[in-house]
Each structure stands twice: as C-alpha cells, then as structure tokens.
Image: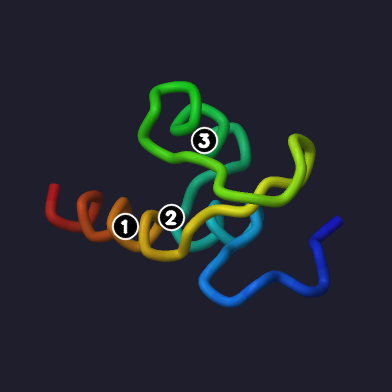
Amino acid sequence: MEPLDLPPGYMSAHQAATTLGITLGGIRELRRRGRLTAVGGSPRQPYYDTEQVLALLAERAAA
C-alpha cells in the first residue's frame, strides 16, 4: 500500500519504479547493486530521494 503522506523530495518504491519504468523487483536490484539507497521510511516501505531517482532516469535515457 502506498503511503499517503510522503515528505517533499521523496518517492515511494512504487513511484520510483513507475518513474524508471521498471518493476519493484528492479528497484530491489538497484538497491542490491548500490545504485539506489533508501533515505527514509521503513524497511518494508522505504522512501527514495527524488533527485537520485531522476539522476538514474537521466542516465538510462542517455544510454
């Protein structure tokens, strides 16, 4: 379930996955490889920094 009140500048895992065009499994893989780090939330519902997600999106678009 999506959190209803995210702090400004943060994305839920679902929002990050949608932005990057990948699945939640892809988000887990990015975390495992150290490409994406959780910056808040809980272990089951982490938050991600919007800037970091958008940087990954730009990197994917450039490749």
Task: Provide residue 28's location: percent of width, then percent of height.
Answer: 57, 31
Give the vertical position of 59 relative to 23 (above or below): below
Task: Report whether 59 appears left or right of 39.
Answer: left
* Mark 3: few/some/many CA within 10 Å (<14, 14-19, 20+): few
* Mark 1: few/some/many CA within 10 Å (<14, 14-19, 20+): some
Question: Which amino acid, mark 2?
Answer: Leu
Q: Residue at x 56, y 48 (%)?
A: 39
Which residue is disc 3 drawn over? 26
Give the vertical position of 48 relative to 51 (above or below): above
Marks 2 and 3, how far apart at CA: 9 Å
Residue at far left of view = 62
Marks 2 and 1, how far apart at CA: 6 Å
Of 31 and 63, nearer the camera is 31
Which residue is disc 2 drawn over? 20
Q: Residue at x 44, y 33 (%)?
A: 30
* Mark 2: few/some/many CA within 10 Å (<14, 14-19, 20+): some
Give the vertical position of 54 relative to 47 (above or below): below
Give the vertical position of 55 relative to 23 (above or below): below
Question: Which amino acid, mark 3?
Answer: Gly
Question: Which amino acid, mark 1?
Answer: Leu
Pointers 2 and 3 in contact (C-beta within 8 Å)? yes
Q: Identify the mark nearer the N-term, 2 or 1.
A: 2
Secondary structure category for the residue under label 2: helix
Q: Residue at x 24, y 50 (%)?
A: 60
Task: Report whether 15 appears left or right of 32.
Answer: right
Query: Which label belongs to residue 57?
Result: 1
Marks 1 and 3, how far apart at CA: 13 Å
Q: Name the quarter where the N terminus is drawn.
A: bottom right
Pointers 1 and 3 in contact (C-beta within 8 Å)? no
Q: Identify the mark nearer the N-term, 1 or 3.
A: 3
Task: Provide residue 19's location: percent of width, then percent of height.
Answer: 48, 62
Pointers 2 and 1 in contact (C-beta within 8 Å)? yes
